[in-house]
Image (cartoon, coloured by chain):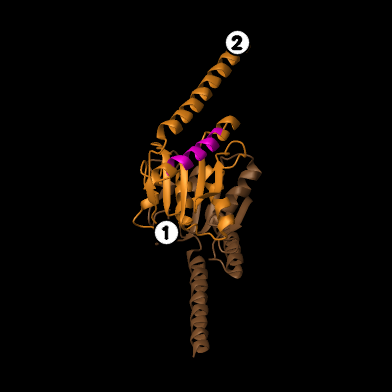
Chain colours: A brown, B orange
Amino acid sequence: MDSSEKDIFYMRKALELARCAYDAGDTPIGAVLVYEDRIIGSGYNKRNALKSPLMHAEIEAIREGAAVIGDWRLEDTTMYITLEPCPMCAGAIVQARIPRVVVGAMNPKAGCAGSVINLLQMQGFNHRAELVTGVLEEESAELLRSFFGRLREQDRINRQEGTENSE
Amino acid sequence: MDSSEKDIFYMRKALELARCAYDAGDTPIGAVLVYEDRIIGSGYNKRNALKSPLMHAEIEAIREGAAVIGDWRLEDTTMYITLEPCPMCAGAIVQARIPRVVVGAMNPKAGCAGSVINLLQMQGFNHRAELVTGVLEEESAELLRSFFGRLREQDRINRQEGTENSE
C-alpha cells in the first residue's frame, strides 16, 4: 500500500469506531493511533455514555498508545480522526508530540486544525504536526448528519408526545 | 472569606499539590476544582511518573470533578491552577464548560490563557471562561525555578561524573 492507501485503510478503522459511538448515542467520532504499521491506540467518543468531558476518541487513543510505547512522547506515530479535533484534543496531540495527523471531515464551529484556529501548526508552540485533511470526508460527514438528523427526529417526537400528554 | 481570600485559600491547596509533583520529580504544577465551596477534584502533574502526555494536573481534577457532579458539564465550578494551562488543558476547561479559572504564574512559552494564545476566551468557541491571573504568582514561579534549578544541577553532576568515568 502507498501512503494515501494506508491513510484510507486506517481512516476506515476510525470510521468503524465512530459507528460504535453512534450506536451508543454519542456524536459519532472515532480515532486510531498508528505506529510502525500497526494500531497501538484507538477510541471513540464516549462523552455522554461516561458523562465525562475528557472521553473523546483522540484522548482514549493517546492513553492506549502511551501505554504501549511506554513514554509520553508518541514520536513516529500517525493519528487518524474522523472529525477535525477540538481544542483539548488538538492540544493533547501537541503535548504527545504526535508528528502526523490525518483528518476526515472538518468542524467549522469548533475545529482546531484550521477551522476556528490551527493548534497543530502554531508558530508559538514547540511542536507542529504534519496535517492531511479530507480523507473519507464524505463518509464521516454523512455519519454525523445521520446522527444529528436522528436526534432532531427524536426531539420532534418527544415534543409531540409532550404536547399530546398535556392536552 | 471574600472572593479574593477564597482564591488565595484554594490556590494554596493547588500549590500543596504542585509540591507533590516536585517531590516525585515532575514539573511542579497543581490544580483544584471547586464547587459550592468544596474541592470536588484535584490533581498534580504526573507526566513523567506515569509516562503519559495526558496526566496533567487539570485533567485529573476535571476527571474527578465530572465523577462527583455526574455530568460532563462542570457548571458553577472554579478551576485553580498554579501555572497557566497548556493547549490541552485550556481546551479541556472549554470542553467541560468551566466558567471561572484562577491562575498562579504565567507560562510565556506554552500558556494558553493569554501568553501564546487565549483559548479560554476565544470568540470562535461556544464557551468562554472568566479569568483571574497572578494569584500567589511568586510562590508558584519560585517552586518552578527551584525545580528547574535542581534539574540543571543534577544534569551538571551527571555530566561531570560521565567525564570522570571516561578519564
**Secondary structure found at label 2:** helix
- Check the picture and name the quadrant holding the C terminus of chain B: top right
Residue tagged 1: A110
Query: Residue at 58% of width from left, 39% of height from top?
Result: B46
What chain does mark 2 sit on? B
| Quadrant containing the N terminus of chain B in the rendered view | top left
Farthest residue in the bottom direction? A167
Residue at 39%, 60% in the rendered image: B126
Say which mark, if any, is on residue B164: 2
Percent of width and height locating residue B154:
55, 21
Out of A125 and A79, give the one closest to the viewer.
Answer: A125
Q: Label 2 is placed on what type of residue?
A: Glu
In this view of the protein, can residue B49 be seen by the observer?
yes
Q: Are marks 2 and 1 in contact (CB under 8 Å)?
A: no
Q: Amino acid at mark 1?
A: Ala
Look at the image and give the residue range highlighted in magenta.
B7-19
